[in-house]
Amino acid sequence: MLNDTSLYPSSGHSSAADASEADPPVGAAEAEVRARVDELESRLGDPRDPENPFGHAAVLAADERAELIAEAEVMLTEFGLNAEFVPRALGGRLDRVDTLGRVLRGVFRRDASLGLGYGATSLLASVSVWAGGTDEQKRRTAELLLGGGRLAVAFHELAHGNDLVRNEFSALPQDGGYLLNGRKEVINNVERAEALVLFARTNTAPGSRSHSVLLVDKAAVPADRIGYLPRFATAGMRGCLIGGVEFTDCPLPGDAVVGTEGGGVELALRSFQLTRSCVPSMVLGNADTALRTVVGFAVDRQLYGRSVREIPHARATLTGAFLDLLVGDCMALAATRAVHVLPEEAAVIASSTKYLVPKLLGEATYEMSVVLGANFYVRQGEYGAFQKHVRDLPVATLGHSGAAACQATVIPQLPRLARRSWFSGPQAPEALFGVHDDLPPLDTDRLALVSGGDSLAASLLAAAEAAETSTDAGEYTDALRTLVRGFTGELRALREECAALAPQDRTVLADPRVYGLADRYALLLAASACLGVWRGQRDEAATPFLSEPAWLVAALRRIAGRLGHALPPIPDGCSEAVWDELLARTFDDRSFDLYDTPLGGQG
Amino acid sequence: MAVPQPTRTEAEFRDWLINRLSLYLRRPEDEIDLRVPFAEYGLDSVAALSLFGDIEDEYGFYLEPTVVWDYPTIAGLARFVASQAAQRAATGTGGGE
Ligand SMILES: Cc1cc2nc3c(=O)[nH]c(=O)nc-3n(C[C@H](O)[C@H](O)[C@H](O)COP(=O)(O)OP(=O)(O)OC[C@H]3O[C@@H](n4cnc5c(N)ncnc54)[C@H](O)[C@@H]3O)c2cc1C
């Protein structure tokens, strides 16, 4: 199956087998990824088919019942979705974090509850083990996941939220092991998972060395010391089984600790870089389906004697949403590849991505909802998928480090990066932006708590220099120059503001305007990522849309608009080119992201 | 990159840290106790990490960001930083990363 290249539909993709001069061949790794994506799509089937057990109708019905589709879980087990979370060396298929986001995106496009409830939860849990565990812990975790088992991530306590260091759940050392006491609340799959990754206080002293991550094999602890709290009913991700757990004087062996005792905060901050970068990549799938639903509506619905798609405002709204998805994917691509290519710099990129991308997507879906009108409120039928995706999406913003908490990890690092890197450091390597290119192996030991440099921001300067001298954006050259000058000017202003940042503004008590600074910074990283992607695709015959400057200039204008910059005029046909691509991808069922993936098992 | 300064005494490090902390916490210097952990003053773990950058800027040598977690009081951190400074002065490895 994996090497059956005939699976690929002819939609601009080429494969190693049918390569021609016009269509350059893709590498073996890319071909294998496409085969996985295509296989998942064909298993998910046509979303519009009312008989499809995994189609939109079935997904909506399951959501109304607050259930995950049981057959879908069986199907994902057969597909081996869990293998996506397990490193290749341990028998799984995880060797690239960008691919992880790309494959899971397919599940999120169909049903985010399934994406989180079947899959991503086990990933959020297991990254601690991959990044900090012993060989034995890794082996056991891989075995559990590859056997179709589940791992829950029990970090959160209702009383303390993002403030992990104040967590009270305790695992105090006793007789060479630990004694667990306390509760974890709002935890996905906590009851049905075979094992838990727990964040617990192992020392009563205050500070950042008093917590540890523990791997708990439920079968190995006394059953009468562990109890479950009632399920939480939620507004989004309704199918997920979100509950709580309570331990009472539950003994745990000493080898349950993942990494070092007291190393929990450090391990979380390091391993979260993997998940903060790829969760936004996954939830691009939600926004894809939301947009597809609304474009479908705009095409079908007749008003004033024409279809809604002919109303300029509706068209501009949908074009803008498509651009926001592309911006989000450029940033997610840079973040998921940074953990491989620039691990020492990934900390701020990952947190900025986790902050910005879900926000862009949330705002884009709000704008789309205006086009959908009253149908936004309808929970079934042809457009019912929209409201479900809109309800599911915010979990990505608040869960697993909320937006403000992500910004709070970026802010203290900015003054140093501004001074050392932005205008003097090296620019990011091309590999950071390679949409279809291989990556060096992941080395989680190189992920740093504090970014050592910021070549993604420094690349803006290089892009500005290139824009001043080169004319390879053709008729878009002037617009591109103006936009990029605006970004470097913004970066310069940010550097001044960072230099003037009072020490108190690097703490939780920072002035709210400092969060505005982190917001502008994240937008500049997104702009740099878009420029990098375009530069990398410019000469690619296989990606005609991405290689043209129209989308780039239109996307950068979206970013410049958010920054409050004056917008340069754009050549005629710029918005039309993006709109035409959006319509073509809607009619051909291809994804609204950098990969332009054929959807619904058309192969 | 800051030029390495002549080695300072532990007491000088302590005074400098008290001043930094008073700025972070916006509290008068005389309210800051040498032995109270940073966390008890409400300095969160991520903000504490930025102290390492201050040390680097002020003294011109690189320390692991987590020193502030491992030596979570002014007294402990000053002693550690002073010993590092003395060691580097002795071996002639002053600045840089
Ligand atoms: C559907 C769902 C599933 C979940 N599944 C799991 C799971 O499986 N495992 C798990 O461990 N948790 C899970 N959670 C919990 C999730 O991790 C928490 O919601 C998240 O950690 C944020 O905590 P909080 O919502 O309590 O927000 P709080 O931390 O209470 O934050 C409230 C507000 O305070 C502000 N704030 C907080 N921290 C900062 C900061 N550092 N700087 C500036 N402002 C700040 C922000 O405005 C923030 O929104 C789940 C949540 C949901 C909704």
Image: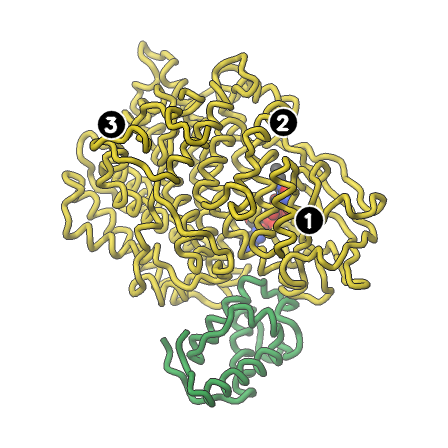
Chain colours: A yellow, B green
Residue B87 pos. (x, y %): 50, 86
Q: Is residue A498 visible?
A: yes
Q: Amino acid at mark 2?
A: Leu
Q: CA distance from mark 1 to mark 3?
A: 49 Å
A223, B57: nearer the viewer = A223
CB under 8 Å between discs 1 and 3: no
Q: Chain of mark 1?
A: A
Q: Chain of mark 2?
A: A
In the picture, measured across the screen, residue A128 lies left or right of residue A46, that is right
Task: Name which of mark 3 and mark 2 comes first in the sequence.
Answer: 2
- Look at mark 2 in the image and give the residue it sits on: A68
- Look at mark 3 in the image and give the residue it sits on: A576
A299, A470: nearer the viewer = A470
Q: CA distance from mark 3 to mark 2?
A: 40 Å
Task: Name which of mark 1 and mark 3 comes first in the sequence.
Answer: 1
Q: Say which quadrant the C terminus of chain B sits in.
A: bottom left
Q: Say which quadrant the N terminus of chain B sits in.
A: bottom left
Q: Is residue A510 above or below residue A435?
A: below
> Which residue corresponds to the image point at 70% horizontal and 44% vertical from the top-left?
A195
Q: Is residue A582 above or below residue B71?
A: above
> Which residue corresponds to the image point at 49% horizontal and 88% vertical from the top-left?
B8
Specify the label residue A86 is tagged with. Answer: none
CB under 8 Å between discs 1 and 2: no
Q: Mark 2 falls on what kind of element? A: loop
- Look at mark 1 in the image and give the residue it sits on: A157
